[in-house]
Image (spheres, grey):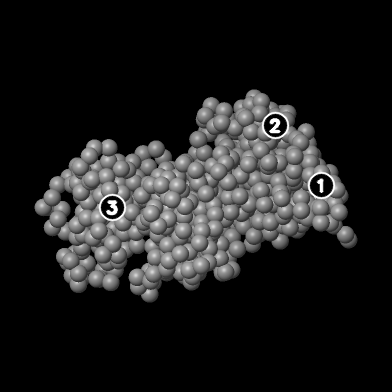
């Protein structure tokens, strides 16, 4: 798949919270059609001298009709802060689309469980939409510390059932995603997860114990995003591989996690 | 359009712009952004006799104006390169160089010998300066005797253009440059990364898995430029300058300080098309300044 580096106009900007913003970038429909759910972009944070490298941001959603690519950005440092300060009408220097993306099931009518924690819920919206469009049954399981951590609830509801856990029980069920009752009630064919590493490890353990096919999306620190710098490696059954090109999505069978 | 072609030993470059080892993969990773045939050359990443897994994650830390890395020469070994990667590189109309690393003079020589057999690889860059591997590279690059011993061994086994990449982590880089020149190096390239460190104070831990790493990017530029200028006055062989080059102006600074060619490294991570912009920029600068031949600015610093 061809990759591009270009200046993309910002056509929409919505703060979901003080520290979470969705930027909608204009991308031509024919390019959007090439993007696979779970892929990411590398954005250059401009107008700041202290940020050196690009920032990897997962693709939140692709709207081919309106020619938009949505990016959900968690503002956690100077780079993401600088990106969040960009306004509609400005352009962003964007390297895209990067990485492999999630697997679309070969068989029809699969039961799909998509688990997202924190900003890790970002790629699940686009993945869920793509799965629903192909006739699969999508269940989202979103986890957070508190109710305000559950972002884009209404958007997720468009493509499947949305289950929620919060650590203090202020929304959905109390506990961690792996404790949600939906796991006992339903048999899922595939699980996909993105979020903090302990959450993904817990999900991977659950999937392995129940013999469910499972993919996780990793977010190792990276520099180039193109497989050149070899900084973002994950230790796998094939040795050290670049998360930016061989990932970010890995089947848990490929990883050397202690499950 | 100025005449931009330069020679490094027997190597003819259509322009002085190459890419630095470890920052440009095997070239094809950048083919969507760069017309590889327009490059003076590209140097594929550090290759060793046997496969290396490299260091543990995390291998990278961002710094002000640069980054630290401790990749540790991860590569699949020279045999894999010859069999699986080299065939993908033979059709490019540019110079493809291999960066060769090792942990003993014999290792280096054996690796260089395999590369010598590859028709379409006209030169190697000898990495005696990797700061991220305990048993290899920099140990040789920091003493005149060590550097000389590796170059001597490789020179016997390798008869094409031999460029030796120097470490800046030394007391006198000119002494090392003279030592490798005396053993028959055709050129030197400098600088490799500067050894550095970054700390996560909340965890009271280094941000790098092995504690230290190599610093690269614009922050090292003044150090690199100074070293190129010093080495240019100390040796008679051509110099390939590198260290934080991001723009045509940066490249021209190196040329003026005495570099015959330059390598662009970390800047490829920020803008994968940067090399094309540097080549175009050098051309435009020469045109704007009435420079008809790039040689007119090489080492042309006024006193």
> Does B243 sit above or below residue A119?
above
The chain to which mark 3 is attached is A
Label 3 in the same subunit as label 2: no
Residue drawn 14% across the image and 47% down it: A187
Q: Which residue is mark 2?
A: B122
Residue A165 position by quadrant = bottom left
Percent position (x, y) of residue A129?
Answer: 29, 52
Name the residue nearer the viewer: A77 or B215. Answer: A77
> Mark 1 near mark 2, Cβ–Cβ under 8 Å?
no
Percent position (x, y) of residue A193?
Answer: 29, 52
Label 1 in the same subunit as label 2: yes
Task: Count residues near mark 2 (Cα–Cα under 10 Å), then give few for <14, some for 14-19, many for 20+.
Answer: some
Task: Count residues near mark 3 (Cα–Cα under 10 Å), then give few for <14, some for 14-19, many for 20+.
Answer: many
> Does B192 sit above or below residue A85?
above
Q: Which residue is mark 3?
A: A128
| Residue B2, numbered circle | 1
The answer to whether residue B204 shows anywhere in this view is no
Tell me the distance, in whole angstroms, between the alpha carbons under discs 3 and 2: 51 Å
């Amino acid at each position: 798949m061809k990759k591009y580096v270009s200046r993309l106009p910002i056509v929409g900007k919505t703060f979901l919270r003080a520290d979470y913003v969705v930027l909608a970038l204009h991308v031509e429909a024919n390019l959007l059609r090439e993007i696979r759910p779970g892929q990411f972009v590398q954005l250059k944070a401009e107008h700041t001298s202290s940020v050196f490298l690009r920032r990897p941001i997962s693709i939140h959603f692709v709207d081919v009709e309106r020619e938009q690519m949505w990016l959900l950005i968690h503002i956690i440092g100077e780079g993401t802060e600088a990106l969040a300060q960009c306004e509609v009408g400005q352009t962003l220097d964007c390297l895209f689309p990067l990485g492999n993306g999630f697997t679309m099931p070969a068989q029809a009518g699969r039961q799909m469980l998509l688990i997202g924690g924190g900003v890790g819920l970002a790629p699940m919206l686009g993945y869920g939409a793509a799965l629903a469009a192909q006739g699969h049954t999508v269940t989202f399981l979103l986890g957070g510390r508190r109710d305000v951590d559950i972002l884009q609830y209404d958007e997720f509801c468009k493509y499947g059932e949305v289950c929620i856990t919060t650590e203090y029980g202020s929304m959905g069920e109390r506990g961690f995603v792996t404790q949600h009752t939906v796991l006992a009630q339903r048999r899922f064919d595939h699980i996909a997860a993105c979020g903090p590493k302990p959450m993904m490890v817990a999900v991977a353990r659950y999937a392995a114990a129940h013999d469910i096919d499972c993919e996780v999306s990793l977010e190792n620190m990276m520099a180039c995003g193109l497989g050149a710098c070899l900084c973002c490696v994950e230790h796998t059954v094939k040795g050290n591989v670049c998360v930016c090109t061989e990932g970010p999505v890995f089947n848990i069978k490929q990883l050397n996690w202690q499950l | 359009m100025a005449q931009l072609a330069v020679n490094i030993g027997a190597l003819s470059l259509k322009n002085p712009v190459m890419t630095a080892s470890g920052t440009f993969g095997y070239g094809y990773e950048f083919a969507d952004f760069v017309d590889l045939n327009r490059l003076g050359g590209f140097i594929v990443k550090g290759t060793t006799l046997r496969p290396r897994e490299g260091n543990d994650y995390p291998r990278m830390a961002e710094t002000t104006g640069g980054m630290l890395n401790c990749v540790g020469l991860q590569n699949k070994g020279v045999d894999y390169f010859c069999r699986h990667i080299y065939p993908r590189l033979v059709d490019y109309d540019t110079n493809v160089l291999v960066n060769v690393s090792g942990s003993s003079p014999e290792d280096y020589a054996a690796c260089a010998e395999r590369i010598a057999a590859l028709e379409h690889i006209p030169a190697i860059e000898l990495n005696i300066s990797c700061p991220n591997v305990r048993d290899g590279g920099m140990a040789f690059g920091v003493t005149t005797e060590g550097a000389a011993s590796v170059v001597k061994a490789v020179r016997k086994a390798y008869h094409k253009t031999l460029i030796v990449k120097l470490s800046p982590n030394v007391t006198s880089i000119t002494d090392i440059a003279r030592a490798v020149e005396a053993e028959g190096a055709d050129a030197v390239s400098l600088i490799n990364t500067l050894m550095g460190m970054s700390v996560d104070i909340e965890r009271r831990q280094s941000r790098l898995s092995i504690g230290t790493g190599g610093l690269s990017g614009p922050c090292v530029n003044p150090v690199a430029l100074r070293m190129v200028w010093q080495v240019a006055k100390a040796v008679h062989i051509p110099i390939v300058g590198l260290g934080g080059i991001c723009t045509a102006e940066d490249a021209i600074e190196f040329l003026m300080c005495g570099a015959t060619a330059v390598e662009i490294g970390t800047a490829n991570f920020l803008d994968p098309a940067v090399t094309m912009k540097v080549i175009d920029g050098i051309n435009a600068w020469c045109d704007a300044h009435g420079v008809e031949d790039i040689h007119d600015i090489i080492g042309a610093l006024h006193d």
